Amino acid sequence: ESANASVGQVISSEEVEDVPMNGRTPLMLSRISMGVTGTNEPGQVRPFDNAGGASFSVAGATTQTNEILVNGVPDTTWDKRLAYSPPQDAVQEVSVHAFESDAAYGHTGGGVVNQITKGGTNGFHGSIYDFNQVSKLYANYFFDNATGTPRTNSNFNQYGLSAGGPVIIPKVYNGKNKVFWFFAFEKLKDSDPANALVEGGSTLSTVPTAAERTGNFSALLAVPGTGASYQFYDPASGTLTGTSGTTITRTPFVNNIIPASRLNPVALNYMKLYPLPNITGQVNGENNYGITSADSDVYDNELGRMDFNISDKNKLSYDFRHNYLLQHKNEYFNDPAFGLLLIRKNWGTTLDDVYTLSPSLI
């Protein structure tokens, strides 16, 4: 297609349900559209992976410059990452347009992707689902096997429901053909290796040995070829020497052992938060700990929608959406003194009123 052509593709609700979807994140359907190239890192893209969901290029434009919409309303963060991801069973259609020239759209250096949510119908419909993966069915990483690092415990459990229909209050109101409701809920709990290379982690770390925790670093002096470079010196023994009196020399600790009286009690308490080595590591003690801890996520997602047929010419719809993520990350030593907490919350709402004045004017 030429650069100024409008290239568009619509993925219908049947395709949304039938296509195996990475992380059950509806926006990942954009990758099967013509002219779209995914640029996210290899691996699972979950609904709360804001950058991963938005990492795609449309018709060769720069990645993560696209306008992402939900029901026609902007759905991006300040840097064009995905903000809110509807549950898969709540999405009716995903449309992708390259070089959108319609005056209704803008805010994009690439394409426009719109996620249209489902609404209720005259019949009651719904779904219940549960997807579960456990590490007991996984193989260990190749390099973890090579170093003797045990397999990390991990799991992925994603479950939810959706339901919709007409608003009916027995003996009071019958909303068939007039008022409809739809609701979708999703929950996700997972844990994956904190050392996952796909997330920029490291499979190895370095921790103090039992001897080093007592101030005994004599083993470093025995490192072949470079042992002398590991000599420890008493920082309190500095003296000025040399003809100009500007050279500072210090007394080495005998056999690289720091006297117990010189050990800081605060530092000794810090040492209790570090585990002991669990693999051999290098001759100088580096990389003597194989990381087996896991990051964990708890995520929930809710979407509600109401549709009103006010008249044959006037259609009104309203939706409200919210999701929340709590992530424990990089607790490499299975200790709450390390790592960090990440919280992401999204709130959104849309009010859409369409009035048909004539066959050619809306």
Image (cartoon, rainbow, N blue to C red):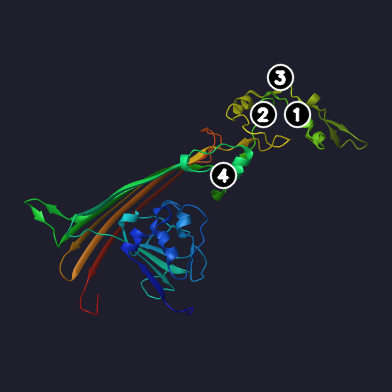
Callout 1 amino acid: Ala
The extreme left residue here reads 171
Question: CB of mark 2 within 8 Å of CB of mark 3?
Answer: no
Return the residue at label 1.
219
The residues bearing labels 1 and 3 have C-alpha atoms spaced at a distance of 21 Å
- Residue 152: percent from the left, percent from the top? 52, 39
Number of disc labels: 4
- Element type at mark 1: helix
Q: Could you tell me which residue is drawn at 13 percent across and 60 percent down? A: 176
The residues bearing labels 1 and 4 have C-alpha atoms spaced at a distance of 31 Å
- Element type at mark 2: loop
Label 1 crowd bin: few (<14), some (14–19), many (20+), radius 10 Å: some
Return the residue at label 2.
209
Res 141 label:
4
Question: CB of mark 1 within 8 Å of CB of mark 2?
Answer: yes
- State the residue in front, 138 or 260: 138
- Residue 1: percent from the left, percent from the top? 47, 78
- State the residue in front, 136 or 29: 136
Disc 4 versus disc 3: nearer the observer: 4
